[in-house]
């Protein structure tokens, strides 16, 4: 059946797309499980989240097409689309950075999941495609907007209208992913990035995310960014950061 589950390791949370028998293809129940998994990570007060696929074969092969005749034709499609969008919103709404750790196929709905992360790090065996034109459907406008924000309108149109598969190096050149490493390095590299973020001042990291989102998406208003920035200057962490610098020691940030 598959699910999207949460794992917590200290300040690092993980959302695992867990359907390896189908290369982590997302069915409607899996999309519906994302919100609960995200709430688990919020309750655990993690400082960074990794989004990855279970197993070693794929990040996510896309939405499970086998259920489309029953769940995406006619009136049923509205409910499917709602659940899918709620899943994306649960990822994008996390107040901490989300790192998509991508290996193998990352197709269609898998790309949409990754687009709602803040950073995308790929293994050099990763493959990407947006294939709705092969099925006679359209990629959702929200996902298209995020794709355009990353790769630009021309490349977005190229990916959408050709449905071609691109490799990790091309994805890096397009701006679809931010770093490429070998498959053997991927887990350790992502863990190091996540650990580094987890050691920094949480309010500063949140302000950075909110500010960038206010400039690049419609989710966050400029006022939210201003409030997040102001909170940093009135925080105990700011005092700790300055004191640690003056005392030449590592700061101990508490997120307040």
Image (spheres, rainbow, N blue to C red):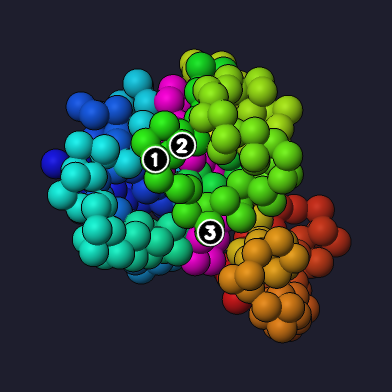
Please give the name of the residue rendered at 24% of the width and 58% of the height, measured from the top-left corner.
74
Q: Contact, CB < 8 Å: mark 3 with mark 1?
A: no
Q: Mark 1: give few (<14), some (14-19) or many (20+) Cα within 10 Å.
A: few
Label disc, if present, on residue 136 of the rendered structure: 1
Camera-nearest residue between 32 and 159: 159
The magenta segment = 92-111
- The answer to whether 202 appears left or right of 69 in the picture is right
- The residue carrying mark 3 is 142
Q: Contact, CB < 8 Å: mark 2 with mark 3?
A: no
Residue 69 visible within the image: yes
Instruction: State the SS at label 1.
Output: loop
Q: Position of residue 27 (x, y in %)?
A: 24, 46
Q: CA distance from mark 3 to mark 1?
A: 18 Å
Q: Position of residue 219 (x, y in %)?
A: 59, 71
Q: Contact, CB < 8 Å: mark 1 with mark 2?
A: yes
- The answer to whether 252 appears left or right of 63 in the picture is right
The residue mark sitting in front, 2 or 3, is: 2
Q: Mark 2: give few (<14), some (14-19) or many (20+) Cα within 10 Å.
A: few
């Amino acid at each position: 059946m598959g699910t999207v589950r949460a794992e917590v390791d200290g300040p690092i949370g993980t959302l695992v797309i867990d359907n390896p028998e189908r290369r982590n293809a997302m069915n409607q129940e899996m999309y519906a499980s994302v919100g609960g998994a995200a709430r688990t990570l919020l309750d655990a007060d993690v400082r960074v989240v990794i989004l990855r696929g279970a197993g070693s074969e794929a990040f996510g092969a896309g939405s499970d097409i086998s259920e489309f005749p029953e769940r995406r034709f006619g009136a049923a499609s509205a409910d499917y689309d709602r659940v899918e969008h709620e899943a994306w919103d649960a990822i994008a709404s996390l107040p901490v950075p989300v790192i998509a750790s991508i290996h193998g196929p990352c197709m269609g709905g898998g790309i949409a999941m990754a687009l709602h992360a803040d950073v995308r790090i790929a293994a050099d065996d990763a493959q990407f495609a947006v294939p709705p034109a092969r099925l006679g459907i359209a990629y959702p406008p929200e996902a298209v907007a995020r794709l355009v924000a990353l790769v630009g309108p021309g490349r977005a149109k190229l990916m959408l209208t050709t449905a071609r598969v691109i490799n990790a190096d091309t994805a890096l050149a397009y701006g679809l992913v931010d770093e490429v490493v070998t498959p053997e390095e991927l887990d350790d590299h992502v863990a190091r990035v996540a650990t580094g973020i987890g050691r920094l001042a949480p309010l500063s990291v949140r302000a950075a995310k909110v500010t960038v989102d206010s400039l690049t998406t419609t989710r966050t208003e400029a006022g939210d960014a201003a409030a997040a920035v102001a909170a940093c200057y009135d925080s105990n962490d700011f005092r700790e950061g300055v004191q640690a610098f003056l005392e030449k020691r590592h700061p101990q940030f508490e997120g307040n």
